């Protein structure tokens, strides 16, 4: 019985170890990633004041599309665009970097940095994000990723007429910075 368990365990490790190695070698160099995030606000600070989570309507959602290229087996970088909705919206353009924690593992660290440009209905401001993710590839060009991270978003409000930044029924110009915890899921193509 002990020999059967030993042989079964050895066979299991050989098969799945080889499969993990093949996945790493057969993975495409370039991927498109479409992901959606939920951002739970921790606080917001700036010219209009400092506010805790309970004082503002601060949670947000984000939909992003990015192209990522693997320069090295453990390092990938790319660019992307997105749409974010909070109490005010933005359309950020950003750079992204992914670093695999272990050679044959799907866990990775990521960082995003970018800027949202002002339009008629959105506000401008910086974007920064860092976190931990997990990627599962089912085919060479199809997989899922899951991530959790820290999200920092700056909102630049030029005039009191923006009507996008309302705190306690009063519109104020200035800069606010929102700190959030983000949770996301994405499709990899």
Image (cartoon, rainbow, N blue to C red):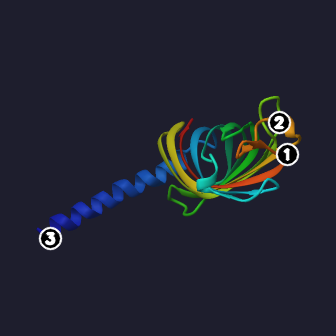
Q: Position of residue 123 (x, y in %)?
A: 79, 39
Mark 1 Cα-neighbour bin, 10 Å: few <14, some 14–19, many ≥20: some
Q: Residues within 10 Å of mark 2 (few under 14, many from 20)?
A: some
- Give the left or right position of residue 26, taking residue 158 as reference: left
Q: Residues within 10 Å of mark 3 (few under 14, many from 20)?
A: few
Quarter of the rendering occupied by the C terminus: top right
Mark 1 element type = loop
Residue 25 pos. (x, y %): 54, 49
Q: Residue 35 location, x and y as percent?
A: 58, 40
Q: Residue furthest top?
A: 120
Task: Name the residue: 41% across, 51% down.
Answer: 19
Spatial CA span between label 2 and label 1: 8 Å
Q: Residue 2: which numbered mark, if any?
A: 3
Residue sticking out furthest to the right: 159
Disc 2 versus disc 3: distance between alpha carbons? Answer: 73 Å
Disc sitting over residue 162 in the figure: 2
Quadrant of the rendered image containing residue 89: top right
Which residue has dot 1 on it?
173
What secondary structure is found at the residue carrying circle 3? helix
- Contact flag, marks 2 and 1 (Cβ < 8 Å): yes
Q: Earlier in the sequence, mark 2 or mark 1?
A: 2
User: Does the rendering let one see residue 99?
Assistant: no
Q: Which one is nearer the viewer's eye here, 152 or 107?
A: 152
Instruction: Tell which of 150 and 23 is nearer to you.
Output: 150
Marks 2 and 3: which is nearer the front?
2
């Amino acid at each position: 019985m002990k020999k059967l368990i030993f042989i079964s365990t050895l066979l299991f490790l050989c098969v799945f170890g080889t499969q993990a190695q093949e996945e790493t070698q057969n993975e495409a160099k370039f991927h498109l990633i479409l992901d959606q995030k939920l951002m739970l606000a921790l606080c917001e600070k700036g010219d209009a004041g400092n506010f805790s989570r309970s004082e503002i309507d601060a949670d947000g959602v984000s939909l992003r599309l990015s192209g990522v290229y693997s320069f090295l087996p453990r390092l990938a970088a790319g660019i992307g665009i997105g749409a974010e909705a909070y109490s005010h919206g933005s359309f950020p353009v950003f750079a992204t970097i992914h670093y695999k924690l272990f050679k044959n593992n799907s866990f990775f660290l990521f960082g995003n940095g970018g800027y949202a440009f002002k339009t008629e209905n959105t506000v401008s401001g910086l974007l920064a994000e860092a976190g931990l993710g997990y990627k599962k590839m089912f085919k060479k060009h199809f997989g899922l990723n899951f991530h959790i991270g820290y999200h920092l978003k700056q909102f630049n409000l030029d005039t009191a007429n923006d009507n996008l930044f309302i705190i306690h029924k009063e519109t104020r110009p200035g800069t606010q910075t929102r700190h959030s915890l983000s949770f996301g899921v994405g499709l990899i193509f």
